[in-house]
Image (cartoon, helix red, strand yellow):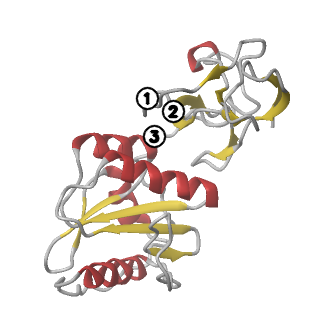
């Protein structure tokens, strides 16, 4: 974890900022590199592009989008912490860069003894509850035996939980939006688990593109209750299971 001194330009208060560390899909702890000595910038207007930075894992070389580092000063000013662009660290050798080659995230990992699954038997979808029940049934079919539904709705809108996984089921009549996919990913990051999305109406084009970049499996559920994989992470999940 990297710590740097930060001074709020609004109230001149001094802080010590520690960069958050997130798990790369390869398992290595990953964090943005703070640009030391660069002035912090008060955030007065937010855009989705400004809220994300590219970070390169020093173990496997994978590049992902991570939340832009920020600090909230007690005076009420939210400060954006400048980070070193990933292009300036591309050639910096990591502790295991030579020993561990980069692996494309969409290629399923080999399994020495795959367990054959029975034919999936879906539940027809007539209500929103049916869709959640059908997604839970499908996750159990994939091998997540401890799938549960939260007893009460949560602000994070997590519909299903299992060991190492959270899932959301969008039953709206409009396609799932980019922000919904990113919010699920952030909730999964904070809990150090993977995320899966199910939708009845599909996804917007930018939501699909972001899910591909973040490695989030996307499924579309038809009226019979059968989830259809929509991207490579979903295909990999079906291939490897829990």
Residue at image location 58% in from the left, 61% down from the top: 193
Residue 49 in the image: state x and y as whole percent. Answer: 43, 29
- From mark 2 to mark 1, how far is it between C-alphas? 6 Å
Q: Is residue 182 above or below residue 226?
A: above
Mark count: 3
In this image, 185 relative to 225: left or right?
A: right
Residue 21 in the image: state x and y as whole percent. Answer: 71, 43
Q: In this figure, which residue is indicated by the disc labeled 2?
A: 52
- Report helix, strand or loop for mark 2: strand
**2 and 1 marks in contact (CB < 8 Å):** yes
Residue 175's disc is: none
Q: Earlier in the sequence, mark 3 or mark 1?
A: 1
- Report helix, strand or loop for mark 1: loop
Q: In this figure, which residue is indicated by the disc labeled 3?
A: 104
**3 and 2 marks in contact (CB < 8 Å):** no
Q: Is residue 132 above or below residue 3?
A: below
Frontmost of labels 3 and 2 is 2
Q: Is residue 80 above or below residue 153?
A: above
Mark 1, Cα crowd under 10 Å, few <14 / some 14-19 / many 20+, is: few
- From mark 3 to mark 2, how far is it between C-alphas? 21 Å
In this image, 102 relative to 218: left or right?
A: right
Q: Which quarter of the rendered picture does the N terminus lie within? A: top right
Q: Quadrant of residue 8?
A: top right
Q: In this figure, which residue is indicated by the disc labeled 1?
A: 49
Q: Earlier in the sequence, mark 3 or mark 2?
A: 2
Residue at image location 46% in from the left, 82% down from the top: 149
Residue at image location 67% in from the left, 31% down from the top: 77
Pick the front one: 103 or 177: 177
Residue 117 in the image: state x and y as whole percent. Answer: 35, 81
């Amino acid at each position: 974890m990297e710590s740097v001194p930060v001074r709020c330009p609004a109230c001149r208060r001094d802080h010590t900022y520690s960069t958050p560390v997130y798990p790369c899909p390869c398992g290595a702890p990953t964090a943005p590199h703070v640009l030391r000595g660069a002035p912090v910038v008060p955030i007065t207007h937010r855009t989705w592009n400004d809220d994300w930075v590219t970070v390169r894992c020093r173990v496997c070389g994978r590049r992902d989008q991570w939340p832009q580092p920020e600090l909230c000063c007690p005076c009420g000013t939210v400060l954006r912490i400048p980070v070193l662009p990933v292009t300036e660290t591309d050639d910096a050798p990591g502790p295991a860069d030579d020993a561990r080659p980069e692996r494309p995230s969409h290629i399923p990992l080999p399994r020495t003894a795959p367990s054959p699954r029975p034919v999936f038997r879906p539940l027809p979808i007539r209500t929103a509850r049916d869709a959640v029940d059908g997604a839970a049934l499908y996750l159990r079919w994939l091998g997540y035996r401890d799938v549960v539904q939260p007893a009460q709705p949560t602000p994070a809108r997590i519909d299903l939980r299992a060991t190492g996984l959270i899932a959301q089921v969008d039953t709206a009549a409009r396609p799932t939006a980019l922000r919904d996919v990113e919010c699920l990913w952030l909730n999964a990051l904070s809990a150090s688990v993977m995320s899966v999305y199910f939708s009845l109406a599909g996804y917007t084009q930018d939501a699909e593109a972001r899910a591909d970049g973040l490695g989030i499996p996307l499924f579309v559920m038809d009226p019979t209750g059968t989830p259809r994989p929509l991207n490579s992470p979903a295909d990999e999940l079906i291939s490897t299971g829990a």
